[in-house]
């Protein structure tokens, strides 16, 4: 199997099996490394204990022989042998040899003397040797007493130690393999548990595909990352559903708004095509009506383009309005020229030293939309008031009128696209129900808020709030 085919095969393995396999492999490697280190440490500790015991026994023997100043003559061998038998252990040999390797005396407890070769040494040593299937630990130390020079040997059979070490290795291996199996099962359970929300999300997406955007995931009450992911998924689907509904409503409203002027123009052109062209009065009326409807279409298209630009625009950095108390009166002056029959009052408090990070044309567009609505629906009382103030780091602009107001049921929807409280009356007044939607998008774009308070037959107050930046923030 080539590397490419292996890679393709691995890519087709479900992620739950990948998690299970990798978790089991990692746990196996960690457990194997831990047990190996533990086994080697225990083995070394046991060998060190045997060596320490042999060294202590060698010191006792040498001290005994040096105190007696034995030269290993025949009359001295019996008490020495009795002493060595007394301190000797099971499966152990103690032997004294001269400088030529000749045996002077030896005591043994179930360990044949020929298993270990007699070797004279000039310095102490501890070695491990093997005789057949038997493992031996041998310690040799030189001894000099008067004219005698020889070597004391302690030979210990390590067969019991090897059996114990093998038993420990078998236990560690058995439990290790069992732990790997348990780790594999645990890894599979863990992978299934971790992937359960993702599988639920995939199933929800399938339901959304077949049943619609209203399907949602069941969120657990756990405050973990997966629960957060599920909540974010549901919130995202809520936004998608709202956007889809808004888009559908937008298309329906736009189609309705476009259909009316097109139908009027079509009716007049049909009238002219049949018989109206010969009648100057009918021709003039039809041309005038068609031009009016074309102007409405032009305004509607312009508003739609403006709304599209606002939705896709990125907040301009470094664009500020300094001293709004000087800029806003100029806007009011321009509006007053267009509507000379209205009275506009302004009152700016504390705005002379503030900086609002918004382009001048956008602030003017927001205020013009609100003022235009105030003028349209305040014919009976031509007083419009604009006040400005600073509070808690925000500059607030309030435009209030004493017009016809807005009902409670319509107030939550007046900033929706194409929404108009009275469609027949709004068509007579002009506009397409997009002005406040544009203003709301512009205010949101610069981290501000737009709020409307209104009572029927009493008037309306629109509040625009935008963040204030100090000079050091510019």
Image (cartoon, rainbow, N blue to C red):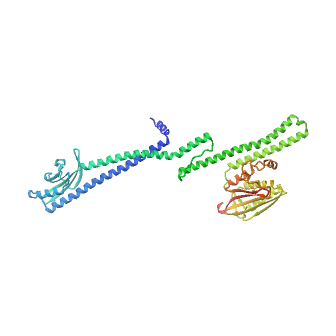
At 58% from the left and 49% from the top, the residue drawn is: 232
Is the C terminus in the top left, top right, bottom left or bottom right quadrant?
bottom right
The percent coordinates of residue 147 (x first, y second) are 12, 59
Q: Residue furthest bottom?
A: 350
419, 61: nearer the viewer = 419
Dividing the picture into quarters, in which one does residue 383 lie?
bottom right
| Percent x, y of residue 24 | 43, 45
* Residue at image point 47% right, 44% down: 19
Q: Residue at x 76, y 46 (%)?
A: 300
Residue 373 horizontal side relative to residue 136, left or right? right
**Horizontal and vertical percent position of residue 343:** 82, 60
Left or right of 19? Residue 331 is: right
- Residue farthest toward the left in the current orientation of the protein: 75
Q: Is residue 101 above or below residue 15?
A: below
The location of residue 398, given as percent across then percent down, is: 74, 60
Q: Residue at x 54, y 52 (%)?
A: 221
- Is 38 positioned to the left or the right of 222 in the image? left
Position above or below: 39 against 399: above
Q: How many marks?
A: 0
Q: Quadrant of the N terminus?
A: top left
């Amino acid at each position: 199997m080539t590397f490419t085919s292996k890679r393709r095969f691995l890519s087709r393995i479900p992620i739950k099996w990948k998690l299970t396999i990798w978790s089991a492999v990692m746990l196996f490697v960690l457990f194997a490394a831990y047990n190996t280190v533990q086994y080697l440490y225990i083995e070394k500790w046991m060998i060190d204990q045997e060596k320490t015991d042999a060294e202590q026994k060698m010191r006792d023997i040498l001290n005994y022989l040096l105190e007696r100043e034995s030269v290993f003559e025949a009359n001295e061998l019996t008490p020495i042998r009795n002493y060595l038998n007394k301190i000797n252990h099971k499966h152990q040999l103690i032997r004294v040899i001269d400088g030529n390797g000749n045996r002077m005396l030896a005591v043994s407890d179930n360990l044949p003397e020929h298993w270990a070769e007699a070797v004279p040494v000039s310095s102490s040593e501890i070695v491990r040797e093997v005789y057949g299937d038997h493992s031996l630990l041998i310690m040799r130390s030189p001894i000099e007493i008067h004219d005698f020079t020889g070597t004391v040997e302690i030979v210990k059979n390590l067969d019991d130690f090897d059996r114990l070490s093998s038993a420990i290795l078998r236990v560690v291996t058995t439990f290790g393999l069992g732990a790997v199996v348990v780790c594999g099962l645990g890894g599979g359970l863990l992978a299934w548990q971790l992937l359960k929300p993702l599988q639920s999300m995939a199933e929800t997406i399938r339901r959304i595909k077949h049943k619609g955007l209203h399907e949602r995931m069941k969120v657990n009450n756990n405050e973990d990352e997966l629960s957060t992911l599920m909540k974010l998924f549901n919130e995202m689907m809520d936004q998608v559903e709202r956007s889809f509904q808004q888009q559908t409503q937008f298309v329906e409203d736009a189609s309705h708004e476009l259909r009316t002027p097109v139908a009027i123009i079509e009716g007049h052109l049909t009238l002219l095509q049949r018989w109206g062209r010969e009648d100057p009065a009918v021709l003039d009326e039809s041309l005038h009506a068609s031009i009016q409807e074309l102007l409405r279409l032009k305004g509607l298209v312009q508003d739609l383009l403006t709304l599209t630009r606002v939705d896709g625009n990125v907040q301009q950095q470094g664009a500020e309005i300094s001293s709004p108390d000087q800029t806003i009166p100029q806007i009011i002056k321009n509006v007053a020229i267009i509507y000379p029959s209205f009275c506009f009052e302004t009152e700016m408090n504390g705005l002379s030293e503030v900086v609002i990070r918004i382009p001048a044309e956008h602030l003017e567009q927001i205020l013009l939309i609100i003022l235009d609505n105030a003028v349209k629906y305040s014919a009976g009382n031509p007083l419009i008031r604009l006040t400005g103030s600073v509070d808690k780091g925000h500059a607030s602009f309030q435009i209030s009128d004493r017009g016809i107001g807005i009902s409670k049921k319509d107030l939550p929807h007046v900033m929706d696209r194409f929404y108009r409280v009275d469609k027949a009356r709004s068509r007579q007044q002009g506009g397409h129900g997009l002005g406040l939607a544009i203003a709301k998008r512009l205010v949101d774009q610069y981290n501000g808020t737009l709020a409307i308070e209104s009572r029927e037959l009493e008037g309306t107050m629109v509040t625009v709030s935008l963040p204030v930046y100090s000079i050091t923030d510019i």
